[in-house]
């Protein structure tokens, strides 16, 4: 899903998958949420809003089913980092 960078309140990026009717929002703490069942009209209004944070709070936040897709960046390492960080060989 293509994300559009924005800077409105705590929102930092928004994206929409019209086929799946999923809205994705990323916050200033790095967390990302996906809302399902979001119609294109809501997406157009959010995307074109001069006050996207207020629109999100008033029309999306508690109106749609939500799923967390990533936690806060400040929470530490990405769970996949262990796949790429080499551990020292202590066998001798």
Image (cartoon, rainbow, N blue to C red):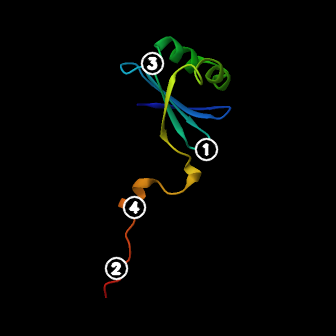
User: Disc 1 or 4, which lies upstream in sequence?
Assistant: 1
Determine which residue is flagged by label 1. 29
Q: Residue at x 53, y 14 (%)?
A: 42
Q: CA distance from mark 3 to mark 2?
A: 49 Å
Residue 89: give its label.
2
The answer to whether residue 10 is left or right of residue 30 is right
Q: CA distance from mark 2 to mark 4?
A: 15 Å
Q: Residues within 10 Å of mark 2 (few under 14, many from 20)?
A: few
**Res. 20 mark:** none
Q: Which badge, 1 or 3, is on the more N-terminal residue?
A: 1
The residue under the point 58% across, 21% down is: 60
Where is residue 45? Give x, y as percent.
57, 14
Spatial CA span between label 1 and label 4: 22 Å
Distance between the alpha carbons at the discs numbered 1 and 3: 25 Å
Residue named by callout 4: 82
Contact between labelled residues 3 and 1, with CB atoms less than 8 Å apart: no
Which badge, 2 or 4, comes first in the chain's sequence?
4
Specify which label sits upstream in the sequence, 1 or 2: 1
Q: Which residue is mark 3?
A: 37
Q: Number of numbered discs present?
A: 4
Task: Depth check: give the residue in front, 67 or 55.
Answer: 67
Of pointers 3 and 2, the one earlier in the residue sequence: 3
């Amino acid at each position: 899903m293509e994300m559009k960078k924005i800077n409105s309140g705590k929102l930092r990026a928004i994206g929409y998958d019209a086929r799946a009717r999923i809205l994705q929002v990323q916050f200033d703490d790095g967390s990302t949420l996906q809302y399902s069942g979001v119609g294109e009209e809501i997406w157009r209004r959010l995307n074109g809003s001069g006050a996207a944070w207020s629109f999100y709070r008033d029309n999306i936040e508690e109106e749609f089913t939500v799923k967390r897709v990533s936690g806060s960046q400040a929470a530490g390492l990405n769970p996949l980092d262990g796949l790429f960080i080499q551990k020292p060989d202590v066998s001798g």
